[in-house]
Amino acid sequence: MITYDLILPSVYHLQRMGTVGNINVCALDSAPLKQLKSSPELAEAFPGQDFRAFPSIQEPVEHKFPEQYREVIAGLKPRQMVVVALPDQLHYKAVMECLNRDQHVLCVKPLVLKYEEAVQIEKAAFKKGLFVGVEYHKRFDRRSLIARRSYESKKLGKFIVGEAKLIEPYFYRSSNFQNWFTCENTDPFVYIGCHYVDLVCFITGLKPVEVSVSGIKGRFPNGNQGYMWSIGKVRFGNGALLSLTNGLGYPDRAAGSNEQCLQMYFEGTGETGMINHDDQFRGVEHSFLESTGCAGSCFNYINPDFFRLVPWEGEGFKPVGYGFESIAASVATVFQMEGEVRKMTPSESLSRRRQMIRKIDKQGIIATPANSSYNELVVEAARLSILNDGEWAAIDYGPNPSARLRRSR
Ligand SMILES: NC(=O)c1ccc[n+]([C@@H]2O[C@H](COP(=O)([O-])OP(=O)(O)OC[C@H]3O[C@@H](n4cnc5c(N)ncnc54)[C@H](O)[C@@H]3O)[C@@H](O)[C@H]2O)c1
């Protein structure tokens, strides 16, 4: 649950630093809320901090509350911030609900599953001067930011070919994944490959124009069929190719916690450039006395860069890493935006907020519907391709951008 692993601890820290006020957390039922409230890890890191749970944790787990988040959002003052961390297929409805209720939004990736929906969100948000950020946290990894700067300043050459890998642990197969990670809904490319597609776009500014994804099916413990592995190829506007290997199968007994890396080659004049990011082994190894490591292992590669709760000069522990920085960037954006317009008339405020939104879109550091909706087109193309045995799907950026199988041209 990303709310447990990243969002709530980040927001708790921002609360104690004064950027965030009251926190409400909604879920489908009381189970995840109880888990958040009773976590010794969170209590130790954020002593005395709490949130209001919807539904109440006293509710029996069997009682479901699929619509309660609407009431909670309706009860907020205008232009607060809502973090949407629901299953992918619910993002569109929830984000539109937030916008209709005049709320700024931070949504976990993928924003939505259809390009058309991303456009609708962008328009609805801009009309009301509301910020919508998409939480692609790999953009905030220092190595990505350094690579982007080097590419922009033409130190590397032109991207020509690359290879990325992201393989999640085997134990995911026995988690809640088995209920929704089925062939008709998603696949490893769409779930995790998209991080590296976004990253290559982020570093180079290039747009993906063709996608081919082949999958290998397998059975989850409950018998459901899903794509356990995939290999994808993405062609970019300048002809460059990126290959992506993804899966749910990094060995539980390995040093983990997953496998991930990116290598990119660039053409220069009379020479080539390269970047090579090992995003898994970042030079830190811990061997624990007991099986307290990832998936019950003892020897682990520790990633100090994504998200860790570490001692600091205050009470408890503080979050560090690009996961935290990514969330903090969106929260700070809204905080600054609202601070700036506080004393303005409604029309001055709207115009200033729109100006700020366009600046964020253009800057392209925080992912927004306007600057990252190629990701929705890539997802649409990838789904077409994997369900048609790896047939290439083309992305058309014409007046009505869309993805379609190449053979149907
Ligand atoms: N690296 C990343 O950026 C990253 C990593 C993990 C997950 N995610 C994304 O985060 C989202 C959630 O993934 P997860 O792994 O946390 O899933 P999860 O199943 O653990 O959590 C989903 C939560 O949504 C709640 N929910 C479902 N329907 C609801 C409703 N109608 N009203 C209120 N709450 C409802 C559930 O109670 C649950 O707490 C997905 O979109 C996923 O793709 C992103």
Image: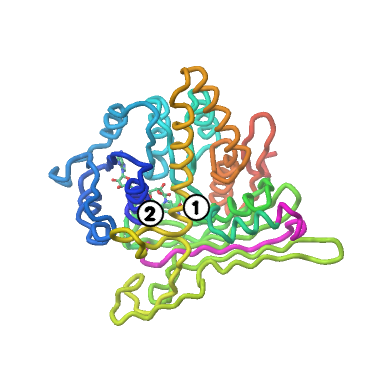
Q: Residue 74, how many percent across, how many down?
A: 30, 27
In the image, the segment drawn in magenta is 151-172
User: With respect to residue 6, does 113 lie above or below?
Assistant: above
Packing grade of label 2 (10 A; few <14, some 14-19, many >=20) is some
- State the SS at label 1: helix
Would you say the residues marked 1 and 2 are in contact, meaning their CB atoms lie under 8 Å apart? yes
Kindly indicate the quadrant of the structure image that contains residue 366.
Answer: top right
Residue at the disc numbered 1: 137
Q: Quadrant of the N terminus?
A: bottom left
Looking at the image, which residue is at 47% across and 29% down? Answer: 130
User: With respect to residue 55, does 278 lie above or below?
Assistant: below
Looking at the image, which residue is at 53% across and 31% down? Answer: 122
Amino acid at dot 1: His
Decide if ligand 1 comes within 8 Å of the CB at mark 2.
Answer: yes
Packing grade of label 1 (10 A; few <14, some 14-19, many >=20) is many
Residue at the disc numbered 2: 6
Q: Residue 185, how many percent across, how many down?
A: 44, 47
- Along the horizontal axis of the image, is 367 left or right of 58? right
Decide if ligand 1 comes within 8 Å of the CB at mark 1.
Answer: yes
